[in-house]
């Protein structure tokens, strides 16, 4: 009979900590969320970055530990976040390879990088959680999607979910959806900002100052998102609710439809997913 033992990284957290490779924007957002909500003790969070200025700055800001090498990070941590750009993965995984063992849980936040790529490059059967967070994590309003390999213990998956839940919502998906979801929650804040900018620029042309327009736009986005969450309401029914016959909204919508707005969004989101697939190759 073959016994499969799923190692639980969470049990080692009494002694060890959470490690981050890369101290950039996303690592900073996640760490600040975890520390700000006291979900995990700051003194047990370790960060390593090739650029020591960044790890030292994060250490100062969040009260965490900064270490000078990957070796040191692995010694201190049972869970390691891979928070570098997808383009740096191959180099980071090669540098990590000599230090890893199957007991370390890896949490990747990278676009396009599959769990099988990570275990293959590390040459280990390590448990891996693949996540796709977004920058609103910085203000506690993130939306993170995640999946896991079969050998991730339930306790570990719950712990990692709670770390991301400290700064937003968490949605569990299948790995085959993880490239497409980037276009839905992760790159999408940029589409929202582009839409906000276009609205603000038009408002200015129509005589409303930028700051006043932006505040009205933000409140409208927040209110509209809340309406979309109400039971029984759909994007279509809400569009109808605003579109009185012969009124102003329909005139605006006519322009959007004439320029194939939905087709443009579809094309943009598919281009995003295609790039994620390329990054994973
Ligand atoms: N930004 C987003 O909206 C977003 C959303 C979801 C997921 N993500 C994912 O999050 C990951 C990080 O993105 P980010 O925006 O936080 O990037 P970032 O700000 O550039 O941070 C990455 C950090 O890793 C450092 N680094 C590079 N090579 C390294 C190495 N070999 N060892 C240790 N550190 C190294 C970089 O240093 P240098 O600057 O000196 O190169 C940089 O400080 C990416 O994989 C991205 O796909 C980003």
Image (spheres, helix red, strand yellow):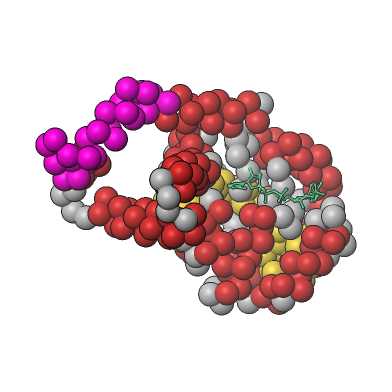
Quadrant of the image occupied by residue 48: bottom right
Q: Is residue 69 left or right of residue 90?
A: right
Asked whether residue 250 is drawn in magenta, I would say yes
- The outermost residue toward the front is 207
Q: List x then y, in percent, for residue 236.
A: 21, 38
Residue placed at 69% from the left, 73% from the top? 62
Residue 113 appears in the rendering:
yes
Q: List x then y, in percent, for residue 30.
A: 60, 61
Which is more toward the observer, 102 or 222? 222
Q: Is residue 111 above or below residue 156?
A: above
Magenta segment boundaries in residue numbering: 239-264
Q: Is residue 14 left or right of residue 271?
A: right
Q: Is residue 236 above or below residue 227?
A: above
Q: List x then y, in percent, for residue 73.
A: 79, 61
- The outermost residue toward the left is 245
Asked whether residue 153 is drawn in magenta, I would say no
Residue placed at 32% from the left, 22% from the top? 258
Residue placed at 81% from the left, 52% from the top? 99
Which is more toward the observer, 225 or 247? 247
Q: Is residue 146 left or right of residue 247?
A: right
Which is more toward the observer, 103 or 223? 223
Residue placed at 15% from the left, 49% from the top? 232
Which is more toward the observer, 193 or 45? 193
Q: List x then y, in percent, for residue 14.
A: 64, 75
Quarter of the figure that contains the C terminus = top right
Residue 124 appears in the rendering:
no
Most frequent secondary structure within the magenta stretch: helix
Q: Is residue 77 left or right of residue 147?
A: right
């Amino acid at each position: 009979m073959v016994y499969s033992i799923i190692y639980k990284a969470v049990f080692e957290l009494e002694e060890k900590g959470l490690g981050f490779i890369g101290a950039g924007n996303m690592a900073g957002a996640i760490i600040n969320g975890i520390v700000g909500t006291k979900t995990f003790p700051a003194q047990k969070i370790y960060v390593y970055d090739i650029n020591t200025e960044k790890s030292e700055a994060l250490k100062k800001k969040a009260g965490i530990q900064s270490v000078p090498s990957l070796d040191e990070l692995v010694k201190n941590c049972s869970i390691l976040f891979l928070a570098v750009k997808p383009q740096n993965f191959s180099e980071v995984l090669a540098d990590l390879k000599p230090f890893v063992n199957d007991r370390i849980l890896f949490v990747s936040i990278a676009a396009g990088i599959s769990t099988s790529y990570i275990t293959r490059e590390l040459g280990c059967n390590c448990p891996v959680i693949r996540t796709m967070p977004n920058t609103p994590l910085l203000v506690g309003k993130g939306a993170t999607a995640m999946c896991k390999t079969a050998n991730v213990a339930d306790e570990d998956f719950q712990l990692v979910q709670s770390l991301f839940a400290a700064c937003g919502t968490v949605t569990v998906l299948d790995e085959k959806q993880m490239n497409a979801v980037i276009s839905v929650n992760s790159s999408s804040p940029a589409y929202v900002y582009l839409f906000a900018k276009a609205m603000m620029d038009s408002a200015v042309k129509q005589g409303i100052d930028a700051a006043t327009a932006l505040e009205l736009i933000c409140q409208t986005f927040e209110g509209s998102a809340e309406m979309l969450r109400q039971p029984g309401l759909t994007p279509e029914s809400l569009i109808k609710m605003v579109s009185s016959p012969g009124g102003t909204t329909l005139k605006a919508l006519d322009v959007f439809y004439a320029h194939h707005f939905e087709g443009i969004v579809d094309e943009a989101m598919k281009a995003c997913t295609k790039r994620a697939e390329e990054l994973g190759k």
